[in-house]
Amino acid sequence: MTPDWLPDFGKALQRLVNQAVDAVVTGYGDDLDGFSRLLTAPVRGVEMLLLLIPVPVFVLFVAAGAWLARRSLGFVLAMASLPLILAGLGVWTEAMQTLSLVIVAVVLVVLIGLPLGVAAARLPRLARALAPVYDLMQTIPNFVYLIPVAMLLGLGRAPALLATLIYALPPFARLTELGLRGIDIGMVQAAQALGLRPRQTLWLIELPLARPVILQGLNQAIMLSLAMVVVASMIGAKGLGEVVLLGLQRADPGLGFVGGLAVVALAILLDRMAQAILGERRPPL
């Protein structure tokens, strides 16, 4: 309760935000609908493609990828067993829905975060301007992301994708900037002395040298995307998060446990496969 001698800034801010959201929805409703369909289309496309793949074929793909990434029979068997666990739990469709959202979100994170990281590494003023924005994006609780995007874009995959993008972008962009800033300046100067142009120096020298740090950021983006996709079930995103949410709503601990176990299996699959494919050394399973 606000004291009588102190103005109630909370209610004033609440009215201001509501008026702003109403104005945007009223004035740009058609544009927001088009933007929502634009975000939903790639997610639906990837989801349909994943659901067309039979479970045995998907398992073979995972096993082949695991073998090519790390020539270890134990690792291959462990990775191949995770899709079988998802299918055995009866949540294969939900798992593919979640995976499709994660894939599209990570692709967007890379497409947006890589240029941002490169620009911030080259322009100190831009880096200083982006730092508080990244801090705000990372410190706001993830549930709070759901409120504005759901109000503007409605319920479904589009707001879930946008919220996931906001949540997973800062670590990747920051680590990209950090990796580029940590490069030995002598290597860059040597490349320039040999006649390489700035763009050639970036692609041939700087990005390869910063690769380990950038890949660490990519792995974090994958894990954060998966975490946010589960939370986004509260605004209509399909997938494993919806299974967990239904378990809570129905007071069905068994259903919630099945959904949670499936999330763990998918998280292990994404994390270990990403680490193996991206070339990071991890202790054997």
Image (tube, rainbow, N blue to C red):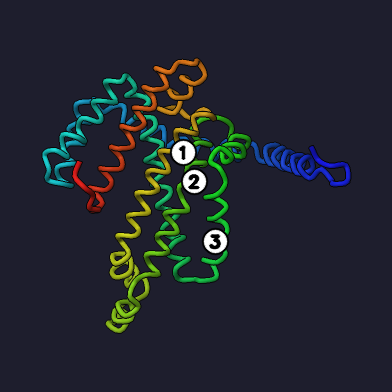
Give the residue displayed 46% in from the left and 19% down from the top: 247
In this view, the residue in front, 204 or 233, is 233
What kind of residue is marked 3?
A: Leu
Discs 1, 2 touching: Cβ within 8 Å: yes
What kind of residue is marked 1?
A: Met
Residue designated by label 3: 130
Q: Residue 71's x, y, as percent?
A: 12, 45
- Is 174 left, or right, of 71 in this rendering? right
Q: Earlier in the sequence, mark 1 or mark 2?
A: 2
Assign the C terminus to one quadrant of the image: top left
What kind of residue is marked 2?
A: Tyr
Residue 67 higher or lower than 59, as above or below: below
Residue designated by label 2: 167
- Is 114 left, or right, of 192 in this rendering? right
Give the residue displayed 32% in from the left and 55% down from the top: 215
Give the residue displayed 42% in from the left and 54% down from the top: 172
Residue designated by label 1: 228
Q: Earlier in the sequence, mark 1 or mark 3?
A: 3
